[in-house]
Image (cartoon, grey):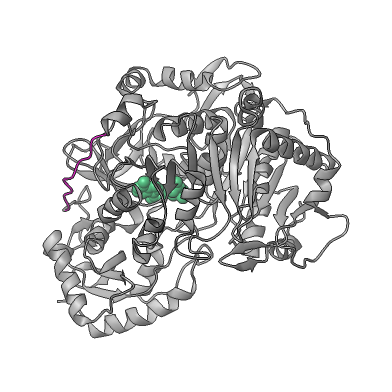
Amino acid sequence: MPDAPKTIESLEVEERVFAPPPEFAARATADADLVRRAAEDPLGYWADEAERLDWMKPWQTLLDDSNPPFYKWFVGGELNVSVNCLDRHLDQRGERVALYWEGEPGDRQAITYRDLHERVCRLANGLRSLGVKRGDRVAIYLGMVPELPAAMLACARIGAAHTVIFGGFSPDSLSDRIQDCSCRAVITADEGWRNGKTIALKENVDKALTSCPSVEAVVCVRRTGGEVGWVDGRDHWYHELVAGQPPECEPEAMDAEDLLYVLYTSGTTGKPKGIVHTTGGYLTAVAATHRHVFDIRDDDIFWCAADCGWVTGHSYIVYGPLANGCTGVLYEGAPGFPGPDRWWEIVERYGVTILYTAPTAIRTFMKWGKEHPRLHDLSTLRLLGSVGEPINPEAWIWYQETIGGGRCPIVDTWWQTETGCIMISPLPGVTATKPGSATHALPGVGADIVDELGESVPFGSGGYLVLTEPWPGMLRTLYGDDERFVETYWSRFPGLYLAGDGARRDEDGYYWLMGRIDDVMNVSGHRLSTIEIESALVDHEAVVEAAVVGRSDPTTGQAIAAFVTLQASIEGDDALIAELRQHVATRIGGIARPASIVLTDDLPKTRSGKIMRRLLRDISDDRQMGDVTTLANAEVVSEIAQMAAAARAAGTGE
Ligand code: 7RM
C-alpha cells in the first residue's frame, strides 16, 4: 500500500447554512456573551457552572493538572449526585413531573420529583440492608423501566458506583463486565419488553452469575410477570425489598473525585474498556451542556430517546436533565411497536418540546415514510438533536423538515462515552448550522485537528480530532487499567487527547466528523472518508442507508466496497447499481466510485445503532469475522457475506 499522506482528503461540499431563528436567539440560555466569556476564561466558565450545583463542602482547587493525564477537578469538594438531581428540587418543584414513563405495552406513569425521590430513597435503604455500601460496585441490567434511573440514583445516594449493562447483552458479556469491576449486587428484572416479545433478563443474570463470585445479592423487578428461577438467600424481589424501607435516606457526602460509574464500551479489538466517570466534574459537565446545548427552559418536555445502557442515557436522560430539574420522557420499547408512528404518538401525547436521537433512528423513519409522523401533531417541538454518528445531510434535512416542520434548529452533538458530555455542537441560539457538521467546540472545550506529526492543520484540511484541554466530564481512567488509558488516548500525541475520529474543518472553521480513524480508506494513495461516500449514496433518492469500507485490492491498495439499503418500495437491479456508482462519481469524483455495491435490507449495527464497518471489512476481505458480541442484528451478517462473495466473484470493478 502506498504511504498515507498526512491528512484525510475531503471531496464533498455542503453549502447550505441555517441561521438560528431570531425569536429563538432572542431568548436562548446560551448567547454570544457566554461564548466570549468562556473563550477568555474557560476554567472560570466551568467554575461558574459548578456553582449551580449544591455542594456539601466547597472545593479548594478547581483543576489539579500536576500529573497529566490523571486530571482532578474540584479537588476537596464534596457533594451527592442524587441530592443534586432530586432533593434540591423538592421545595420549588416537588410536584413537577421528573419523568413521563411509557411502557411498550402502553402502561404509563407520571413520576414527580417527590415520587422519584421517595423511590430512590427506599431502594437506597434496601441496597444498604443487603450490605451494599459506599465504595462498592452494582451492576444494573434492566430494560427502560422507571426502576432503571431510580437504581442509578440509589447507587449514587449511598456512594456505590453503578455499571449499567444494556439489556440486549448476552450472559457472557454480562459476566465479563460484572467480573471486571467485581460487583457486589445486580439489579435486574424478570424480563423486558421489546417489539412485543420478552427478553429473559433474569435468566441471563442467572447464567452470568455462575462465574461471578463477587455477587452477593440480586434484586429483581417484576415487569412482565414471567417465570424466573430463584436462588434463596441471594435473590430478592424489588417490590418486597423497598416496601419495608423508610422513604428518606441519608445521602453519602462524596468526594468530587469519587467514582460515580463505570460504563463499558467495546473497542474495535480486545476486551471492552471500563470508562470511569467521577462525581463533581461529571455532574457539572452534563448539567451545563444539557442546559446550554438544549436551551433548557422551565416548561420544556425533553425526550432523549436513547437507552440508559448507553452513555447518552446516563448523561441526557438521567444526570443532566434531573440536575436541571427538567421534565423528561422515558419510553421502554421499540420505535415500531405496535406501529411505525409510536414515537410521534409519544411526542404528541406529552407535548415533547425537544427530541434527541440518533441518525440511525432518523434513517429508519425515513425508510418507513413521511406518512407516519404526519398522523400526529408535532407542533410542540422546538429543537431537535442528533448523536452517535455523523448525520448525513439528506437525513438532517429530512429531520428538519418532516419532524421539525422547518422551524426547529438541529444540534448535531459530537461526543463519546469517554468525554462524558457533549463536546462539539451548535448552540441553538448562537450557531448558524450546516447540515452534516457538528459545527464548533462548546464553551470551555478545546478541540483541534492535527496531522500525523500532531501539528494543527489549516482550515480546509482533515486529520485526527484531538481535545487540547482537560474538561470536567472527562474519563479519569479505564477501570483497573491506567496503562491502557494512557496508551489508548494520550500516547500518540503528547498532551493531547486522541478521540480516534477523523475530522476536517472547512474554510469557516466548522468541524465535519468523518468516522473512526480505523475506517478511513486508502485508494491509490488517497485517504478517503467512508462518511462522505456514504452521504453521497444516501443522497440518491432510492437509498436510505449506506455503509462503505475499503477492501484489499492488488492494484489500488484498497477498493471501495459499498453496502446499500434501498427505500422499501424500490426493487434493486444491475441498472440501479450502475446508476448509484455513477452518482457517487458525479457527486464526489471518479476516485470515490465504489468498486462494488451490495444491496441489503439491513446493515450490521451495534446496539446503539452505529454501523459496524469492521465486520463489513472482514466480509469484504473474506476473513474470519472478529468479535460480534456487540452486534444488534447478527442474522444480517451471513446474508451480506453471501452477497459480497457473489459481488467479488462478479468483479464489478473497472
Ligand atoms: C455519544 C456516543 C462515540 C463515537 C465517536 C464518533 C461517533 C458520536 C457523533 C459521532 C459524528 C456525531 N458515545 N459519534 N456522535 N460522529 N457526529 N454527532 O455516541 O462512545 O458510543 O461513541 O460515536 O465516532 O467517537 S459512544
Question: Where the N terminus falls, by quadrant?
Answer: bottom left
Direction from residue 1 to residue 612 in the image, left or right: right
Residue 528 at least partly seen = yes
Residue drawn at (52%, 22%), measured in percent from left and top?
50
Magenta-drawn stretch, dominant element (helix, strand or loop): loop
Residue drawn at (79%, 50%), measured in percent from left and top?
239
Residue 572 part of the magenta segment: no
In the image, is residue 272 above or below residue 29? below
Direction from residue 486 to residue 191 in the image, left or right: right
Residue 130 at least partly seen = no
Residue drawn at (16%, 73%), measured in percent from left and top?
579
Residue 545 is situated, as x and y percent measured from the top left of the image, at 32, 64
In the image, is residue 576 above or below residue 118? below
Question: Where the C terminus falls, by quadrant?
Answer: bottom left
Residue 330 is situated, as x and y percent measured from the top left of the image, at 56, 48
Direction from residue 585 to residue 441 in the image, left or right: right
Residue drawn at (28%, 45%), measured in percent from left and top?
406
* Magenta-tinted stretch: 12-20
Q: Nearer the viewer, residue 555 or 464?
A: 464
Direction from residue 551 to residue 49 in the image, left or right: right
Residue 303 is situated, as x and y percent measured from the top left of the image, at 49, 44
Residue 153 is situated, as x and y percent measured from the top left of the image, at 66, 38
The total number of labels drawn is: 0
Residue 200: name its quadrant.
bottom right
Residue 226: name its quadrant.
bottom right
